[in-house]
Amino acid sequence: MTKKFLSDGFRAAFNGLRETVIFEKSFKVMLVIAIFVVAAMFYFPTSRLEKIVLLLTTFPVLILELINSTVERIMDVVTSKHDNRTRIIKDLMAAIVLLASFGAVVVGALIFLPYIFNF
């Protein structure tokens, strides 16, 4: 593996991430929430295990949102008409992100609420 190959790969990855941050509103919202979660991890006296659990629930939401955005763009390229199959595929992808987000919110609440309300 050459240095050029690695640098090209990282460049492409960062270009894709930049594209997502610029054009995908839902990803921006989730990224801001993820930043707050990471900041809260260090603000509150969370344990190492709690930090790991928070990261293992936060980053998959971002990753799934990237996958969702990718599938939506692929569907837009494959077909310009909005038929029922395209809608179902996009809705299924959105449901995946929604479920992961719900799970992350529950985990975040279980970890942070005791620190916030001292119980």
Image (spheres, helix red, strand yellow):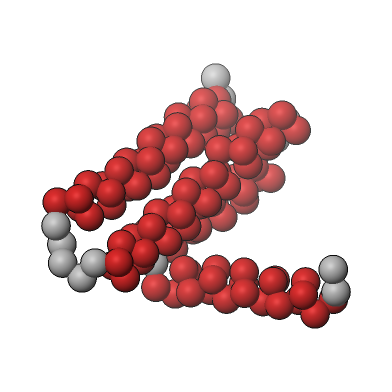
Which residue appears at 22% of the width and 55% of the height?
86
Q: Hey, which quadrant is residue 56 in on the image? A: top right
Which residue appears at 32% of the width and 47% of the height?
94
Q: Is residue 116 visible?
A: no
* As drawn, 14 above or below 26: below
- Residue 33 left/right relative to 15: left
- Count of all numbered marks drawn on residues in the image: 0
* As drawn, 24 above or below 55: below
- The image position of residue 13, as x and y in percent, is 62, 69
- Residue 53 left/right relative to 79: right
User: What quarter of the picture does the N terminus occupy?
Assistant: bottom right
- The image position of residue 112, as x and y in percent, is 55, 33
- For the residue pair 74 and 48, the one nearer the viewer reads as 74
* As drawn, 50 above or below 2: above
Kindly give the residue lying farthest to the right in the view shown: 2
Which residue appears at 31% of the width and 62% of the height?
75
* As drawn, 28 above or below 64: below
- For the residue pair 119 and 111, the one nearer the viewer reads as 111
Q: Is residue 9 visible?
A: yes
User: What quarter of the picture does the C terminus occupy?
Assistant: top right
Which residue appears at 39% of the width and 44% of the height?
97
- The image position of residue 114, as x and y in percent, is 55, 25
Kindly give the residue lying farthest to the top in the view shown: 119
